[in-house]
Image (cartoon, grey):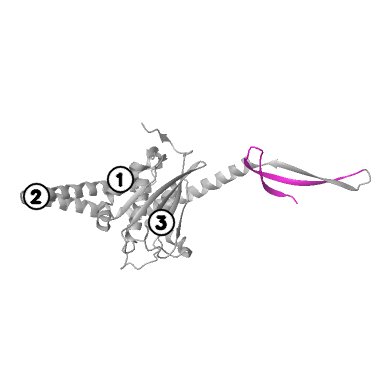
Amino acid sequence: MDGELIQYTKDGRRIIVDSRQVLKTDEENKPFKVLEINTDITERRQAEQRQLALVELERSKAELERFVYFASHDLQEPLRGIAGCLQILEKTYKDKLDDNARELIQYSIDAAGRLRQIVSDLLSLSQGRHDDITFEALDLSQLLDQAKKNLVAAITESDAIITNDSLPVLPVYRALIIQLFQNLIGNAIKFRSNDPPNIHIGAQHLEGQWLLSVQDNGIGFEQKYADRIFKAFERLNSRNSYPGSGIGLAICKQTVEQHGGTIWAKSEPGKGATFYFTLMAQQADQKLKSKQ
């Protein structure tokens, strides 16, 4: 039968072939053999898949802009207010505060400043200024460290233990990947069980991309909801029990797709959850700045 087949070459390469069978007849027009003609169409199919991926990427970019705008626009003023109140507190009661209190206030001011910068970066992205965006070759372990600094209060309060594999240097957009780690780790802390959160960030190199994971020992969820959780404003738990906007994982999805990857989750109630996502080893259509 005619059609496309998957075959393997002598050196083990996986190829796609267009297979056609031709019936050969003799001088008396009697069939005596069937010829199978296989044409390697691997490059054609890969080109088609790349084109489909580009179309999907453009769609996800538009969704990312919308999600990020709504998620970050209203954060600007509260963050200014927090930083302003802390500065007033420090100036007004400076002589009455001990060194520990002054250090905590300064740390809070710095944290608010970092959050304002992240929000500013995300707003710039959501407003469509793609020409100003460059993917930089960055060490993901440093971006993970920044995300943990942003979450230091939640990590300390929950006694969370966070470990990680050796993470790669990849071409990424800094603010978004910090936010990605922050959202996934923050979710793991929020949806914890009675035990302290134990969170591990894994990394595995695949062909042309990296597979990363964030695994926790939290309350988990039923696998049938694995797709639903990535939709904006979808919640599996009540707002009273677990406060939040309901768009964190939707933003994670858009961030990963913005980087040409995919994200998914595996879980079981009471047995924690693992969020997997891929990041491309190269970004073909973005200007890259080499890490110095």
Q: Label 2, label 3: how many angstroms apart (C-alpha)?
A: 43 Å
Q: Of the residues shown, which amino acid type is indicated by label 2?
A: Asp
Res 146 label: 1
The residue depicted at 19 percent of the width and 48 percent of the height is: 107
Q: Residue 68: give x, y in percent of width and height.
A: 37, 52
| Span of residues in magenta | 1-26
The residue depicted at 40 percent of the width and 51 percent of the height is: 65
Nearest the viewer among 34 and 172 is 34
Query: Which quadrant would residue 171 be assigned to in this image?
Result: top left
Q: Earlier in the sequence, mark 2 or mark 1?
A: 2
Q: Earlier in the sequence, mark 3 or mark 1?
A: 1
Q: Label 3, label 1: how many angstroms apart (C-alpha)?
A: 21 Å
Q: Label 2, label 1: how many angstroms apart (C-alpha)?
A: 27 Å
106 lies left or right of 58: left
Nearest the viewer among 204 and 65 is 204
Res 98 label: 2
Write down the residue under mark 3: 250
Under tag 1, what secondary structure? helix
Q: Of the residues shown, which amino acid type is indicated by label 3?
A: Ala
